[in-house]
Image (tube, grey):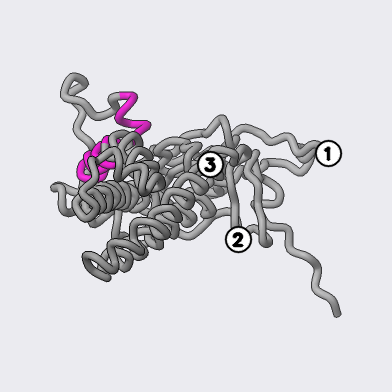
Amino acid sequence: MSRAKVTRKWEVFAGRNRFYCDGRLMTAPHSGVFFLTVFLITATCTLFFIFDCSYLAVNVTIAIPIIGGLLFIFTMSSLLRTSLSDPGIIPVLLQKKQLMWKNRLRSQIQQIVLLLGHLLVQKKPPRASHCSLCDNCVDRFDHHCPWVGNCVGRRNYRFFYMFIVSLAFLAVFMFACAITHLILISKEENYQFFEAVKESPPSIVVALMCFFSVWSILGLAGFHTYLTTSNQTTNEDIKGSFTSRRGQENPYSQGNICLNCFYILCGPVTPSLIDR
């Protein structure tokens, strides 16, 4: 006997998200900026490995392409894990079958629980918020990031943090190596620095790409380090939910910086609620 196909929550309450590979992978509705992110990182690293690493591995140390390769792999894996995973979507539960229209209109986000024979309306979790771009409610909603093509929430925040921190290290590393390459060329051939640039144009392209991007990446990494150490989200920080002016302490803080970092970055990943 053939089994009846099971309808999963992500098939019914997909919001505007797009799902692939039977729901195993998902992205935001507009992924153009995400593909731009992948292209910029990949193209810059390709130039770096072809022109700078090949020279520095022979003239300095073989460790440079190894370190660069490890940083690139870690950065891209963190990016893909952030972009293609469920950020913590809370599915909508409909109260009655009549609410299922042909165009799959959804009712307001609410969960109906049965308690002592009474139907009670349970509101969304306190740190959850609705993303207007994805049209989904995300648990511990941090923000919607077009650069990674997904919301950042409870289930993928740690991977987002690892992505921006590793990208900052990668940008600084490639910038330093590209400048070192140009300096060594100028010393070997008795060139002026700008003559060395003409000798290896891709190196200056790598250096400029890293120089102009690293400032915003370092600032973002620093900001999210602050959020991680205080166990806050971008959404809460913008709203000023826990400020001395309001006289309200952060009830989600674990007590100190180390415990907050351990809770966010090393705690267990909660299971997906959309049957992926």
Q: Quadrant of the N terminus?
A: bottom right
Q: Residue at image x 19%, y 33%?
A: 249
Quadrant position of residue 119: top right
- Which one is closest to the eye, mark 2 or mark 1? 2
Dominant SS in magenta: helix
Q: Residue at image x 33%, y 53%?
A: 162
The residue range painted magenta reads 219-239
Where residue 56 appears, x then y in whole percent? 28, 62
- Which one is closest to the eye, mark 2 or mark 3? 3
Kindly identify the amino acid type of the residue bearing the numbered disc 2. Answer: Arg
Q: Residues within 10 Å of mark 2 (few under 14, many from 20)?
A: few
The vertical placement of 75 against 240, above or below, is below
SS of the residue under disc 2: loop
How many marks can you see?
3
Left or right of residue 189, residue 47 in this image? right
Kindly identify the amino acid type of the residue bearing the numbered disc 1. Answer: Lys
Query: Label 2, label 1: how many angstroms apart (C-alpha)?
Result: 25 Å
Q: Earlier in the sequence, mark 1 or mark 3?
A: 3
Where residue 213 appears, x then y in whole percent? 35, 37
Question: Which residue, given by chain and number where applicable, does mark 2 sit on?
Answer: 24
Question: Which residue, given by chain and number where applicable, does mark 3 sit on?
Answer: 36
The vertical placement of 86 against 268, above or below, is above
Q: Check the image and name the residue furthest to the front.
A: 190
Q: Check the image and name the residue furthest to the right.
A: 1
**Which label belongs to residue 271?**
none
Question: Which residue, given by chain and number where applicable, does mark 1 sit on?
Answer: 102
Front in this rendered view, residue 208 or 240: 208
Kindly identify the amino acid type of the residue bearing the numbered disc 3. Answer: Leu
Q: Residues within 10 Å of mark 3 (few under 14, many from 20)?
A: few
Where residue 110 appears, x then y in whole percent? 56, 38
